[in-house]
Amino acid sequence: LLSNFSIISCPHPIPTMAGSTTKYPRDVGFPLPKSRNLPFLVVCFHLLYLLLPAAVAVSPFLPIYHLFIGAFTSFDKKLLSCCVLYYSTWILTAHLTKRGGSNRLLNSNPLLTYVLSMIPISIRLTTEITPDMSPSGSYIFPCHPHGALAFNRAAVGFCMSELYDEAFPQLPNLKVLVASAAFYVPIVRELWLASYCIEASKKVAVAAIKRGGRGTAVLVYPGGETEQLLTVRGRERVYLSGRKGFIKLALERGCEVCPVYAFGESDLYEHSQLFIGLRRTIQKKFGAAVPLIYGQIGLLPYFPPNGVKLVWGAPIGLFKGRKWAEGEEVTQAMIDDGHALYVAKLKELFDSEKASMGYGDRELEIL
């Protein structure tokens, strides 16, 4: 099963920063697989993303229904006990949605790593990124596009040793901001908690940066659920209109910002426009997206020719020309200027890398 599994870490012969021996850009991650076991992958994707979560979600209702109609059996009693036990763990682990957790049984788990390597996922660093390049020694990494399922987030969280740790040994404290709604989906909740995810709120993000200290990095998807519903296969669309909270957070906490673009993420799934108006209303009222998607076989995604590659841009220079002091007042003008600078740097990153990623004919749509 794992016969064609390997890791690449390929420096390119391009000049590097003064004092560094590493060549940039540098690629880290999984090579293109020589073959794929499609039946096995179909089963895995549907178990992880559909069947197991659905089964756990509906399992309490069967014994309750049997109880009301007078057909309650010993099996129902055992099933209901298991449900009570499982959902009680949500109360015991509620604090982890704010602090984050990790489980090395899942991080770099051979099965999950194999499944994710079939896309495959890799990271490209366009330049060196160290704590010394940020006023507080910490970073915010805004990632685009969200895509139908933010598949690149799952790969980074479950394959830390092969991807993030290899690319950023100098930034060991990673947290990933995700929508709170994700922590109310059975099985998905456990997977996300085991892969460094925390709630995407300012209070939680500030606490994570303070707690992590120097060498902390926060991966965030500014476009969120809105960008998720805007996903169209074959188009590169990001939603940044009014999304300035990550810039404000960076200015307040002294975090430098590096844009990240996931080439190939938009091409994993077809996104149906059926009931799109209703789904946007649900997203606005409840903060949860309902993507109606399909891949080449059900939820098995399409495989982009070059996989999904997360390209890390250089720090945008948010604090260039001035010193940061903790507690200083951040004005709206500073936020607006930082946001405009970020948008320009993101577009610059996309335009400079798209040809080498195999997307030379595409334009970045910033909505």
Image (cartoon, rainbow, N blue to C red):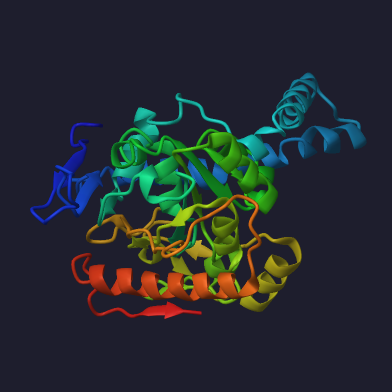
Q: Residue furthest left?
A: 13
- In x, y percent, where is residue 97? 66, 39
Given residues 190 and 213, the one toward you in this image is: 213
* Tally of numbered tags: 0
- Dividing the picture into quadrants, the one containing residue 354 is bottom left
Q: Report the side of 189 relative to 261 (left or right).
A: right
In the displayed structure, 226 sits above or below 99; it is below
In the displayed structure, 151 sits above or below 100; it is below
- In x, y percent, where is residue 186? 65, 39
- In x, y percent, where is residue 132? 37, 45
- Whether residue 191 is visible to the viewer of this picture, yes or no, is yes
In the displayed structure, 140 sits above or below 363; it is above
- In x, y percent, where is residue 203? 69, 48
Given residues 135 and 255, the one toward you in this image is: 135
Quadrant of the image containing the N terminus = top left
- Whether residue 69 is visible to the viewer of this picture, yes or no, is no
In the displayed structure, 216 sits above or below 76; it is below
Given residues 42 and 138, the one toward you in this image is: 138
Q: Report the side of 241 relative to 168 (left or right).
A: right
Given residues 214 and 193, the one toward you in this image is: 214
